[in-house]
């Protein structure tokens, strides 16, 4: 008699179990339909991405194996000739425009990323700790990021002129300012200073968002323990900002390697190739010297270099996270 209630409840238990399984495992057809719908919504973006990014990249790689001239001449297959020429130039870097531009961009990237990271962090900390007109100051600090690079270049051309505003300020304290854009020793630092000012506003937003995610209880506890503001920032805030710092460094490095418009507009790679960048050299080789296959080979090498830097930095970010 004791087993009858259990037997009578067995169909109910099976029904409940089957219902739970159906809820946990949706119908396969429904899942397929949901996936198809998602890809249909993504289709316009994927088509544009493929047409203007993937296809162009693959076309550029293929172009690097051909001698191509403007006009209706048939491209001539040359295999790895252009790559061989570029790697042969490594034995005499000083006389190679491409490898000189690579050295320039490495120096530019190193100092630019350091300057951008420090200035962006300082601006973010300043905005995070002020309460008066925070929105107005945030807008003012962000203006360089949304200003046209050509307009910024025009402004700095005036500032860097021999009789410009910067040298005028130096003259007021009896210092002779340098010839910023005509002196090979100062031209690249001048571009670094300009880009640091324009780019730091963008990365300031990254740091500001990271600062707002730090629990205020940690800072208050440090102050209760007797830590001053600098000690709390150095021992608590800065370590918690390390993932954001790694992200800013990674994005800043990728952006710096692609510097083109400032060098083209302000110095055109001079003086004495001191501001020649890889993208500018690729542009000159393709559109000035009419060597599109050679320029494509340079683009592939630049892509590999940027890819390696990105993968290393991504690995560091993953480890830090």
Image: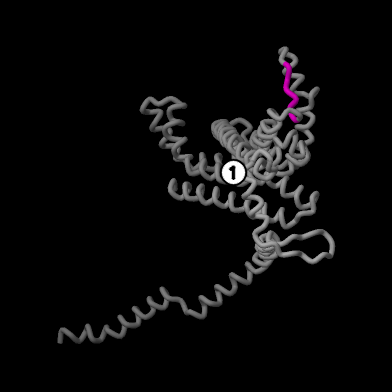
Q: In the visual, does 80 lie left or right of 17?
A: right
- Quadrant of the image containing the N terminus: bottom left
SS under mark 1: helix
Instruction: Say which quarter of the image contains residue 266.
Output: top right
> What is the residue that sits farthest to the left in this orientation?
1
Q: Residues within 10 Å of mark 1 (few under 14, many from 20)?
A: many
Visible residue check, residue 21: yes
**Residue identified by numbered label 1:** 253
Front residue of this view, candidates 265 and 198? 265
Q: Examine the structure image and report whether residue 188 is included in the region drawn in magenta.
A: no
Q: Position of residue 160 (x, y in %)?
A: 76, 28
Q: Which residues are magenta?
A: 176-181
The residue drawn where x is 55% and y is 48% is 309
Q: Position of residue 110 (x, y in %)?
A: 58, 37
Front residue of this view, candidates 184 and 231? 184
Please tell me whether residue 116 is drawn above or below residue 321 in the rendered image: above
Q: Position of residue 155 (x, y in %)?
A: 77, 33
The residue drawn where x is 62% and y is 50% is 87
């Amino acid at each position: 008699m004791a087993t009858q209630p259990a037997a009578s409840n067995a169909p109910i238990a099976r029904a409940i179990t089957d219902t739970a399984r159906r809820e946990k495992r949706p119908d396969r057809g429904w899942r397929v339909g949901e996936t198809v719908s998602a890809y249909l919504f993504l289709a316009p973006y994927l088509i544009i991405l493929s047409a203007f990014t993937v296809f162009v990249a693959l076309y550029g790689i293929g172009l690097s194996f051909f001698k191509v001239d403007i006009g209706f001449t048939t491209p001539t297959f040359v295999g790895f000739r252009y790559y061989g020429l570029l790697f042969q130039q490594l034995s005499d870097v000083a006389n190679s425009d491409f490898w000189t531009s690579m050295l320039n961009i490495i120096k530019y990237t190193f100092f630019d990323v350091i300057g951008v990271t420090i200035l962006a962090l300082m601006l973010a900390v300043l905005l995070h700790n002020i309460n008066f007109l925070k929105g107005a100051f945030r807008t003012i600090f962000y203006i360089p990021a949304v200003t046209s690079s050509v307009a910024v270049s025009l402004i700095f051309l005036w500032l860097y002129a021999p009789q410009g505003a910067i040298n005028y300020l130096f003259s007021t304290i009896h210092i002779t300012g340098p010839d910023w854009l005509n002196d090979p020793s100062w031209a690249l630092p001048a571009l670094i200073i300009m880009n640091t000012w324009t780019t730091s506003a963008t990365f300031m937003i990254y740091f500001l968002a990271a600062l707002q995610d730090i629990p205020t209880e940690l800072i208050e506890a440090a102050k209760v323990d007797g830590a001053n503001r600098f000690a709390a920032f150095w021992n608590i805030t800065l370590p918690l900002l390390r993932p954001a710092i790694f992200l800013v460094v990674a994005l800043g490095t990728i952006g710096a390697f692609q510097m083109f418009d400032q060098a083209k507009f302000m110095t055109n790679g001079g003086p004495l190739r001191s501001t020649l960048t890889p993208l500018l050299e690729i542009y000159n080789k393709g559109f000035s010297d009419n060597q599109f296959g050679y320029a494509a080979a340079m683009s592939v090498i630049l892509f590999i270099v940027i890819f390696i830097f990105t993968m290393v930095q991504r690995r560091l970010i993953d480890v830090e996270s």
